[in-house]
Image (cartoon, grey):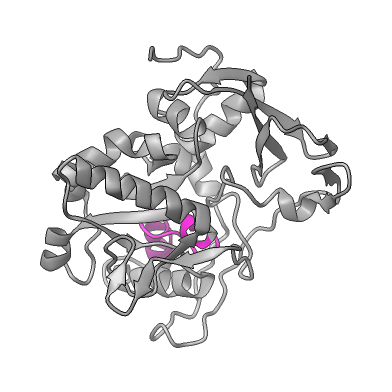
Amino acid sequence: MDRLVFSNIPESAPESRLTEALPIEPGVDMLADEKSTPTPLPIQKNNSSNAQIQVNSTERIESTSHIIAGDLLLVNKWNPLSSGFIPDELKSLKVDSSNFLIPSKDTDTQLKRHVLDAAVKMYNSSLESGIKDIVISSGYRSYKKQNYFFTKKVNQLKKMYPEKEALKEASTVVAVPGTSEHQTGLAIDLTTSELLKLKKSDPLDASFAQTPAGKWAKENSWKFGFILRYLADKTHITGIIGESWHFRYTGLPHSQIIYENNFCLEEYLDYIKIISPLKYIDYTGTSYEISFVSHYKVNVSDDTSICDVSGDSRNGYIVTKKLD
């Protein structure tokens, strides 16, 4: 398929945006270990209204909750989740005590059910392509566990930097609690069995991009609804360094559009808001119409062509329809 040529692409966020992230304050107590009680970091709250979304002719749901839900949910330093956010329909990769749907670094890895189904299809496809060593390093991660990872990184960096600088530097490498996509159950970190042997404590490494598994995942993950979320040349927009191992589920056709145009999720959501509605045919030949609608009033009737309604966590919804 020919590459889409878009006009009026929204400009990238200015460099100063990185300094407008969460107000991380010095003096935050660091966790001694993962079992300790986490000290929540100060996090900006979403200020969505109490408008309502009409899902069908009989069901009405408050948009304050549904604007922060769906496969296109944006989570970053400027759009954090609350400490109490827990995704529904989490499913374990574990089949029994010794078998997993996909090889996993941890025995308790979970993903949202439909995301796990897509990941299994992607893994099976990789096997058919001769890639035999993909391992999931991380899936769903709670706010508490993310707090542990973040404070651990800060403590490491405090050996080299003053505390305030260590906090800022850590936030570009490890997501601040509440700003990690892993809390959504929509994200996976991939590694290989070889990297896992070499770096048991932290198998996530830039070298994954150069492995056959990393190259295959980058070139094919979009077919299964995943995107390479953090691109090295988009750090000024995402606030996160390039991560060749981190893949985020958005579903088709969104993943294909993002892949073909080298978008990050922030750019894609901004673009849909500008171009709406966008008609698009994915690689399977399925036709879609993608629209942005205001969160003040969303009326979605019993339209069977609507296959997905996702909040963007900011100010609206992305409605995806299948066309005949």
Quadrant (top left, top right, bottom left, bottom right) of the N terminus: top left
Instruction: Tell whether position 178 is magenta.
Output: yes
Describe residue 71's horizontal placement relative to residue 116 as left or right: right
Quadrant (top left, top right, bottom left, bottom right) of the C terminus: top right
Relative to 322, say whether 131 is above or below: below
Q: How many marks?
A: 0
Please state the horizontal and vertical placement of residue 280, each as a whole percent of the image: 54, 19
Describe residue 179's horizontal placement relative to residue 79 as left or right: left
Question: Which residue corresponds to the image point at 46% horizontal and 87% vertical from the top-left?
Answer: 36
State the residue in front, 217 or 177: 217
State the residue in front, 183 or 266: 183
Question: Which residue corresponds to the image point at 49% horizontal and 80% vertical from the top-left?
Answer: 29
Instruction: Tell whether position 34 is magenta.
Output: no
Please state the horizontal and vertical placement of residue 312, each as a whole percent of the image: 64, 42
Please state the horizontal and vertical placement of residue 152, each as a whole percent of the image: 36, 74
Describe residue 131's horizontal placement relative to residue 284 as left or right: left
Please state the horizontal and vertical placement of residue 110, each as a whole percent of the image: 44, 66
